[in-house]
Amino acid sequence: MQLLEDRIRKDGIVKEGGVLKVDSFLNHQLDIELYNEIGKEFRRLFPDKGINKILTIEASGIGIACITAQYFNCPVVFAKKAQSINIDGEVYSTTIESFTHKRSYNVIVSKRFLSNDDNILIIDDFLANGCALLGLIDIVRSSGASIAGAGIVIEKGFQKGGELVRSKGIHVESLAIIDDMSVEDGCTFRH
């Protein structure tokens, strides 16, 4: 998606340790016009799949998932990183490791919101090592729902996550795939 790549080149900041900072438009301050184009593109990439729910993980995926859901006319369910008194009843649970935060989270989704009647599109902002996405896939499979695919805004193609998830038969569409990045040279994109 050229619009996204251009924005990453303009406003993205590559930091040491393989971190791409896109907080000025994607995951802290949100550019809603860009989000709208992202939602349209995910709809184009997943046509006629019978998607009836979108699943993401808090927090950065929620905004993207909500805008995308408008184009699928379906609800968004997000995996929570902490149990709260607001979640009653049984939950699907898995553990994921965050590349950015360098910690593990037990993420949960109430069983009331996923069932074997659902056809899920998973949406997330980044795909690096694949831990978050694999955790969401585990939750969907535990529920008996179908996985239509995964829509990723930015994939770090030089890390193993994309290859790992695709090897499991999951249809992954990433809007920008970075093949290489460095503090000095910025990002190089796969086309």
Image (cartoon, helix red, strand yellow):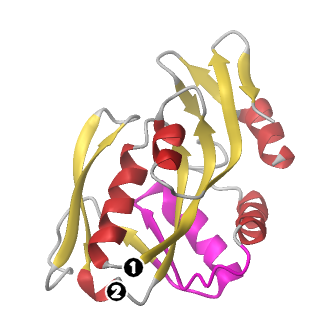
Query: What's under tag 2, amino acid-wise?
Result: Ser
Crowd around label 2: few <14 · some 14–19 · many ≥20 (10 Å): some
Q: Quadrant of residue 35?
A: bottom right
Q: Position of residue 16 (x, y in %)?
A: 51, 15
Residue 126, how many percent across, how many down?
54, 45
**Residue 104: percent from the left, percent from the top?**
23, 42
Q: In what element is the residue under mark 2? A: loop
Quadrant in the rendering for residue 184: top right
Please indicate whether residue 172 sits to the left or right of residue 12 in the image: left
Left/right of residue 166 with respect to residue 153 in the rendered view: left
Residue marked by disc 1: 145
Specify whether residue 140 is painted magenta: no
Residue located at (54% from left, 86% from top): 52
> Marks 2 and 1, Cα distance to the nearest angstrom?
6 Å
- Image-based side of 151 in relation to 92, left or right: right
The label shown at residue 51 is: none
Residue under numbered circle 2: 115
Residue 22 in view? no
| Residue placed most toward the observer, 164 or 101 | 164
Residues tagged 2 and 1 counted as in contact (Cβ below 8 A): yes
In the image, residue 171 above or below residue 3? below
Q: Residue at x 51, y 84 (%)?
A: 75
Identify the residue at horizontal 50%, vertical 59% (top origin): 61
Residue 160 or residue 58, whichever sits in front: 160
The magenta-colored residue range is 47-76
Question: Please, what is the three-letter code of the amino acid marked with disc 1?
Answer: Ala
Mark 1 neighbour density, 10 Å: few (under 14) some (14–19) many (20 or more): some
Q: Quadrant of the C terminus?
A: top right
